[in-house]
């Protein structure tokens, strides 16, 4: 049981590292001028973000169900629900950049030399900045949950 708990914890943390790295890559690429924007790299980072988010949900669910602390620790812990709420907010925010990036990819296929409008690039950069800010809050909530959760 301890080995399973450790494995799930490690996978959960690695998935969060992947998610954070993918967001930082997106944030960095969106700082470039639109004409220099590397759309394929941006799309790969967004796909990695999606995979990481999926892994976080699956492994997190497995941790709740099979982890050493048990479901009661999580389901009756207000910090857990706050953390989950922030994760949901980050996930909902991430839908906007994903949709825009897919639109840009479609336009780039139809119009070689397509350059995304500066206003759209700037808007996506602000959204990804907000996601990173909320992600920092999520890490604070995770640490709080681990230290001040149920006895």
Image (spheres, rainbow, N blue to C red):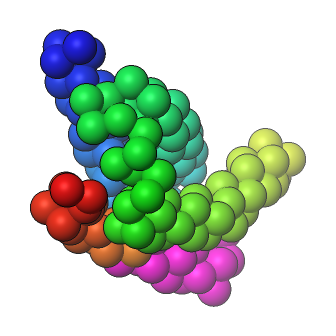
Residue 132 can be seen, yes or no: no
Please give the name of the residue rendered at 65% of the width and 78% of the height, measured from the top-left corner. Answer: 120
Residue 106 vertical position relative to residue 150 in the rendered view, above or below: above
Foreground of the two, 44 or 72: 72
Foreground of the two, 98 or 29: 98
**Quadrant in the rendering for residue 32:** bottom left
Whether residue 122 appears in magenta in the rendering, the answer is yes
Residue 110 as seen in the image, left or right of residue 130: right
User: Magenta stretch: dominant SS?
Assistant: helix
| Percent coordinates x, y for residue 138 in the rendering | 34, 66
Please give the name of the residue rendered at 66% of the width and 55% of the height, measured from the top-left corner. Answer: 98
Which residue is outermost to the front? Answer: 151
Q: Give the range drawn in magenta.
A: 116-133
Foreground of the two, 68 or 123: 68
Q: In which quarter of the image is the N terminus?
A: top left
Residue 8 vertical position relative to residue 40 in the rendered view, above or below: above
| Percent coordinates x, y for residue 111 in the rendering | 81, 52
Foreground of the two, 118 or 129: 129
| Percent coordinates x, y for residue 116 in the rendering | 66, 69
Whether residue 146 appears in magenta in the rendering, the answer is no
Q: Quadrant of the C terminus?
A: bottom left
| Percent coordinates x, y for residue 91 in the rendering | 58, 59
């Amino acid at each position: 049981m301890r080995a399973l708990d450790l494995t799930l914890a490690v996978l959960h943390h690695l998935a969060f590292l992947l998610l954070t790295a993918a967001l930082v890559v997106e944030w960095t690429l969106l700082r470039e001028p639109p004409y220099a924007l590397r759309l394929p790299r941006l799309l790969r980072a967004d796909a990695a973000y999606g995979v990481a988010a999926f892994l976080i949900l699956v492994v997190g669910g497995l941790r709740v169900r099979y982890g050493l602390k048990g479901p009661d620790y999580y389901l009756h812990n207000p910090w857990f629900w706050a953390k989950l709420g922030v994760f949901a907010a980050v996930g909902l925010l991430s839908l906007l950049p994903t949709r825009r990036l897919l639109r840009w990819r479609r336009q780039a296929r139809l119009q070689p030399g397509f350059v995304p409008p500066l206003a759209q690039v700037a808007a996506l950069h602000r959204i990804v900045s907000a996601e990173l800010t909320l992600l920092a809050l999520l890490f604070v909530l995770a640490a709080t949950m681990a230290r001040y959760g149920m006895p």
